[in-house]
Image (tube, grey):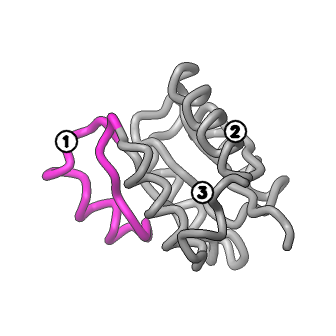
Amino acid sequence: MSRKKILVIEDDPDARLGYHVLLKHHKYDTFFGTDGFSAVTEARKHQPDLIILDLGLPAGDGFVVLERLRSNTYLGLIPVMVVSAKDAAANKDRALKAGARAFLQKPWNDVHLLATIRELLGEDAAEATPA
C-alpha cells in the first residue's frame, strides 16, 4: 500500500517541525507550504491525499486558500483539515462552510490530530500505526 501524502500549510517553523516528526513517525509523506500564496501551487505540485491548513497565514489567510482550493476541479476534492489558534467559536463554522472537512484548535493533541487525519483519509486506526 502506498503512503498517503499530506500537505501542511503552516507559517510557524516550530509547528511545521512538530507536524513533520509526528506524521513521518506514522508513515505519512509530508510536504509543506508556508503562506497563502504557495498553498495552491504546492497542492498542484504534490497532489496530496489531505491538506492541513492554518488560518493565520501571510500572503492570503486560510479562508482565501480554502476558496482557491474549492474553486479548482481537482483540488476541490482533497479533504482539508483546518488547524488554527484563532478563536474556534468565531472560525469553526466559517471554515466548515468554506469547505473544510474538520476543524481543530491549536495547540493540537497528537491523538486527536491523528484520529482526524485517519478519519478524513478513510483509514483504520491500525493502518497508520508505526511498526
Residue 71 spot, x, y in % from top left: 59, 71
Q: Which residue is mark 1?
A: 87
Q: Secondary structure at mark 1?
A: loop
Quadrant location of residue 50? bottom right
Which residue shows up at 68% across the image and 53% down it?
Answer: 130
Farthest residue to the front: give it.
Answer: 131
Q: Which residues are magenta?
A: 84-107
Q: For mark 1, does the 10 Å Cα neighbourhood hold few (<14), some (14 to 19), or many (20 or more) residues?
A: few
Q: Secondary structure at mark 2?
A: strand
Q: Which residue type carries mark 1?
A: Asp
The numbered mark, 3 or 1, whose residue comes first in the sequence reads 3
Quadrant containing the C terminus is: bottom right
Cα separation, mark 3 vs mark 1, equals 20 Å
Quadrant location of residue 121? bottom right
Residue 14 spot, x, y in % from top left: 53, 20
Which residue shows up at 19% across the image and 41% down it?
Answer: 87
